[in-house]
Image (spheres, rainbow, N blue to C red):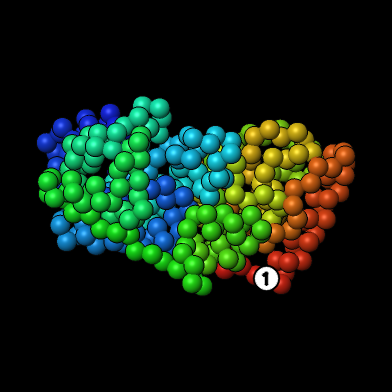
Amino acid sequence: MRLIRGLTNLKRLSGQADSPLADGCVATIGNFDGVHLGHKTIIDQVKQKAAELDVPSVVMIFEPQPREFFQGADAPPRLMPFRQKFEALLAEGVDVVLCIRFDERFRSYSAMGFVEDVLIQGLAVRHLVVGDDFRFGCDRAGDFRLLEQVGQEHDFTVENTRTVTVDGERVSSTRVRNALNVNGLKEAERLLGHPYRIHGRIVYGRQLGRQIGAPTANILLHKMPALRGVYVVRARLETGEWRDGVANIGLRPTVDGKRPSLEVHLFDFAGTLYGQHLEVVFRYGLRDEVKFDSVDELRQQIARDFEHARAWLANNPATPET
C-alpha cells in the first residue's frame, strides 16, 4: 500500500508517467476513525469496483480530522492514532491512502475546486463511493447530486455507501465512542469486529511507576482518547509475544498530567521497551481515573488494581488475539 501525504505530493505524483493513478482509481472519502464494520463494508465496495476496473483502490482521509480543525479541544475523542489507522487500512487491502492536511487553505476550497483539483486532476477518479449525505466545499455546496452531475461530464460514476447495522442501528464511529464512554468494551467489540485496541511507540516517562514498584511502558497520545480509566489489558510486543497487564489511560490527575497518555504495566516482565511499538488490547475495566491526595495513596491503589486484575485474569484466560 502507498501513502500519499498532501495535495502537493498528489499533484506531483499525478504528473508522473509511472504513477499508480495513471489509469485512474476507485476512491472513497472520510475520517475512517476506528475502521469499524461499517468502514470495512465501504472498503469492500471500493475494492470490488477497483478490481472490476483494474485500477487501484484509494481511501482519502484527513489530518487533523475536520471536526478537530473546527472544534479544537471540543472535538470528539479519537478512536485510534493516525499510524494505527494507516495500518488498519493496510490490513483491509487498500492500495493507496491519500492523507490531506485539513487546514485553512484546504477548508477554503470551493466544491467545484475540490472536484477539479483533487478528484479529477489529482486522482483521475473513475468511480467514487460516498454517502448520499456527503457534503463538501467551503460553502457546503458540494453534495452527492453535484458529484453525479460532474461525473457525467468527466466520465466517472458515484455510488452510495452501504449501511451496516448492529441491533437495528447503524454502525458509526460515534456509536463506538459512546460505548467506550460508558465502559462498554463488549459493545465496542461488536461494532469494530475485534476488541478495542491502541497501538503506539513507547517513550520515556517520569519514571514514577518504577519508583513505586510498578514500572510502566508509556505511550504518548497526541489526542484525547475515547477511553479513560484503569483496565486489564493484553499487550503484544514487537517480538510477537503477548503479555497480560494493567493500563491507565487518560491524564494521570494525581501527578498533574497535562497530556493524555497510555501507561501499561506488564505482569512478570523484565526488560527495556523504549522506542518499540506496543499493541494494547483493552479487556476489562477496573475503575475510573481518580486523583489521590498523595503518591503513597496512589501506590496502594495500584497494588489493589494489580490484585484485582490477576484475579479477573485467573477466571478469564485470554486467547492469543485477545
In percent of width and height, residue 42 lies at 34, 59
Answer with left or right where residue 287 lies relative to residue 33: right
- Quarter of image, res 111: top left
- Does residue 98 appear anywhere in the picture? no
Q: Residue furthest top?
A: 105
In the structure shown, which secondary structural element does the residue marked by tag 1 occupy? Answer: loop
In percent of width and height, residue 96 lies at 29, 46
In percent of width and height, residue 93 lies at 32, 56
Residue pictured at 11% horizontal, 36% vertical: 17
Q: Answer above or below: position of 160 versus 238.
A: below
- Does residue 142 appear anywhere in the picture? yes
Answer with left or right where residue 25 lies relative to residue 284: left
As rendered, which of 58 and 275 lies closer to the eye?
58
Name the residue that disc number 1 marks. 316
In percent of width and height, residue 227 lies at 63, 51
Residue pictured at 70% horizontal, 59% vertical: 285
Answer with left or right where residue 224 lies relative to residue 120: right
Q: Answer above or below: position of 79 versus 48.
A: above
Residue pictured at 50% horizontal, 64% vertical: 191
- Quarter of image, res 180: bottom right
Please state which amino acid type lies under the numbered disc 1: Asn
- Quarter of image, res 212: top right
